Image (spheres, grey):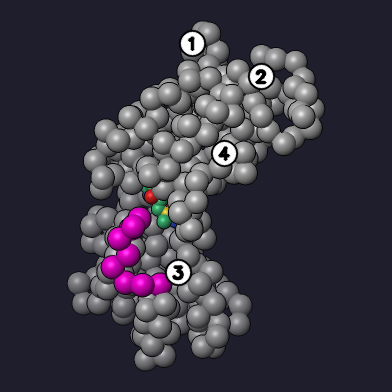
Amino acid sequence: MSAIRRREAQVSFVGAGPGDPELLTIRALQRLQSARVVLHDALVPREILGLVPPDVRLISVGKRAGRHSMPQDRINTLLVRLARRGHRLVRLKGGDPAIFGRLAEEVSALKEAGVSYEVVPGITAASAAAAATGISLTLRGKARRVQFVTGHAEDGSDFDPVASGLCDPHVTSAIYMARKAAPKIQAGLLSAGWSGEAQALIVGNAGRADEVQIRTRLDALSRSLAALPRETAVILLLGAAIRGETRERAKPLNVPTAVHCPFENMTVPGRSRVKIP
Ligand SMILES: C[S@@+](CC[C@H](N)C(=O)[O-])C[C@H]1O[C@@H](n2cnc3c(N)ncnc32)[C@H](O)[C@@H]1O
């Protein structure tokens, strides 16, 4: 069974975007308005759920960092069961369903059960945060790569900035679920040789009415993140695009002063070639 792009799909995985109803796609809105049952995550705000007709059954599966109100296998089973009953079913996920949304597990359960599905993409938090702050995630000649990174390790292991590719000088990293990992990100990058003055952007509830933007330094990252209410969804932007933007505005340059990365003959901004041991 493969994903199909038509109304007959038994289950529509729909990206709710960052939370502003105006940032939903037209197709997402159509699916919400023609559903019989909507299973949604906790991150999907009231403004979006308010677009679902009142006679549609809303089921919260409450997934939020560290507080899964329904285990993943029960969500999978529920999806299959409701789809088999012939309900037009929407599985509504924050942002884009294919980014840190456990889409693969749910799709796999549907495939096994022979249930057809489609995926309606949404605007992911990184794009919403970039739009909110007016930065470009790529910068010609400076940031040639953008990566979406999770700060949450399933096995509780330490966040490793090198393994996560954060210290490549040409990358912009959008770090999801960064709150708990912030001390590890901060310590890891500092011990990898980043300057404490390196700039970071924190965007809370990007794209919503209560959006918060904090520009901070790497050495104040944990403190800045801790200042935000627990309920605020937070994304962290680090790297080349943030530096590039800073560079136009302020001096001295807040760039990593030294980088230990497993990339041979890497060029670090403001320095000549770095010899990698
Ligand atoms: C399980 S992930 C889901 C990501 C989602 N699928 C997406 O594409 O944005 C949840 C994390 O996404 C980030 N996030 C989601 N919505 C956000 C928003 N409006 N503003 C900032 N970060 C957000 C936060 O890091 C949050 O902990």
Label 3, label 1: how many angstroms apart (C-alpha)? 43 Å
Q: Which residue is mark 1?
A: 250
Q: Residue at x 46, y 32 (%)?
A: 186
Provide the residue span drawn in magenta.
Answer: 64-72
Question: How dense is the environment of label 1, judged by Cα within 10 Å: few (below 14), some, or many (20 and up)?
Answer: few
- Dot 3 beta carbon under 8 Å from ligand 1: no
- Dot 2 beta carbon under 8 Å from ligand 1: no
Q: Residue at x 52, y 34 (%)?
A: 188
Label 3, label 4: how many angstroms apart (C-alpha)? 32 Å
Determine if residue 175 is in view: yes
**Mark 4 is on which residue type?**
Pro
Q: Position of residue 245 (x, y in %)?
A: 52, 21
Q: Residue at x 25, y 47 (%)?
A: 231
Q: Secondary structure at mark 2?
A: loop
Image quarter of the N terminus: bottom right
Q: Is residue 18 left or right of residue 127?
A: left
Q: Which residue is mark 4?
A: 161
Q: Which residue is mark 2?
A: 269
Q: Which mark is residue 13?
A: 3
Label 2, label 4: how many angstroms apart (C-alpha)? 18 Å
Magenta segment, principal secondary structure?
A: loop
Q: Earlier in the sequence, mark 2 or mark 1?
A: 1
Label 2, label 3: how many angstroms apart (C-alpha)? 42 Å
Q: Which mark is residue 98?
A: none
